[in-house]
């Protein structure tokens, strides 16, 4: 399985930092955001990685190179202007898939230091638990990793049920936010002409309505690093309180 890291965004809310540095190269806890992803993908055995870029894109290429220093093989998909998420994936599709094999896509500006990408490898199965092929119009075309609704997005994106992700809001289903980590079948993007702008959300909602969008709740550490203040908070040293001094009359 191959993976794609989305790194073409301008990062407007992160200005002025992103005036001179692409957002995925901003460091969290001593390491660029995008490098966290590369290392975790390689750890899971996923070494063939495509990175799209637009704003200050050459800085990303210069910083990461061919990926050999991380144990990865990096390929780049350059965009003159950012094509939005679905547009960027569609342009990179020939680099990502043979037209059949699913692939992973993760946003380059989220911080998920402990995410295990090995869990993505078997999320989109062509057969059910009894070994029978899923009908093409019933199988999941994407598997999304959801997170609990952050303060900046309290309404969430989809409701999670035993039957997958749904658009409707119901009391018996948990409303969650898409964590910008997903596994996709290439057929989702085959109808988008390479080089055109296209958003991902309408495509996902369409498949949710058709009952072909799967997902699960990710409970690990997850941060959408959107502002300089958020970045600074993540980089604030963790203070460990020193143990209280033992009094003179205490024994060991």
Image: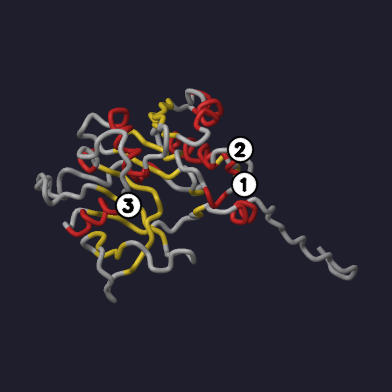
Asked whether the beta carbons under mark 1 and mark 2 sit within 8 Å of each other, the answer is yes
> Residue sitting at 27 percent across and 73 percent down?
170
- Circle 3 residue: 144
Identify which residue, 197 or 59, lies in the foreground. 197
Residue 85 to residue 78: above or below: below
Q: Position of residue 202 (x, y in %)?
A: 27, 53
Of the numbered discs 3 and 1, the one sitting upstream in the chain is 1
Q: Position of residue 107 (x, y in %)?
A: 43, 45
Label 2 element class: loop
> Residue sitting at 29 percent across and 76 percent down?
171
- Circle 2 residue: 20
Q: Position of residue 62 (x, y in %)?
A: 55, 25
Label 2 Cα neighbours within 10 Å, binned few <14 / some 14-19 / many ≥20:
few
- Mark number, residue 16: 1
Identify which residue, 232 or 46, lies in the foreground. 232
Of the numbered discs 3 and 2, the one sitting upstream in the chain is 2
Residue 245 to residue 1: above or below: below
Asked whether the beta carbons under mark 3 and mark 2 sit within 8 Å of each other, the answer is no
Real-space CA distance between mark 3 and mark 1, rounded to the nearest whole angstrom: 32 Å
Real-space CA distance between mark 1 and mark 2, rounded to the nearest whole angstrom: 8 Å
Label 3 Cα neighbours within 10 Å, binned few <14 / some 14-19 / many ≥20:
many
């Amino acid at each position: 399985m191959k993976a794609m890291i989305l790194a073409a965004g301008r990062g407007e809310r992160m200005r002025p930092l992103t005036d001179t540095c692409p957002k995925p190269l901003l460091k969290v806890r001593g390491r660029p955001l995008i490098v966290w992803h590369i290392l975790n993908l390689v750890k899971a055995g996923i070494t063939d990685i495509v990175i799209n870029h637009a704003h200050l894109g050459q800085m990303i290429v210069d910083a990461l190179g061919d990926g050999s220093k991380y144990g990865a093989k990096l390929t780049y998909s350059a965009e003159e202007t950012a094509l939005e998420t679905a547009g960027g994936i569609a342009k990179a599709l020939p680099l990502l898939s043979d037209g059949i094999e699913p692939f992973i896509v993760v946003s380059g500006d989220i911080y998920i230091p402990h995410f295990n990408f090995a869990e993505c490898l078997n999320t989109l199965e062509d057969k059910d638990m009894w070994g029978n092929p899923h009908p093409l119009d019933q199988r999941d075309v994407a598997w999304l990793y959801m997170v609990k609704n952050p303060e900046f997005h309290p309404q969430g994106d989809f409701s999670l049920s035993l039957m997958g992700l749904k658009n409707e809001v119901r009391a018996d289903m948990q409303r969650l936010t898409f964590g910008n980590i997903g596994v996709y079948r290439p057929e989702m993007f085959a109808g988008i002409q390479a080089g055109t702008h296209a958003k991902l959300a309408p495509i996902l909602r369409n498949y949710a309505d058709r009952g072909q969008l799967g997902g699960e709740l990710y409970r690990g550490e997850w941060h959408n690093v959107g502002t300089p203040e958020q970045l600074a908070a993540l980089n604030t040293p963790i203070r460990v309180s020193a143990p209280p001094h033992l009094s003179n009359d205490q024994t060991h």
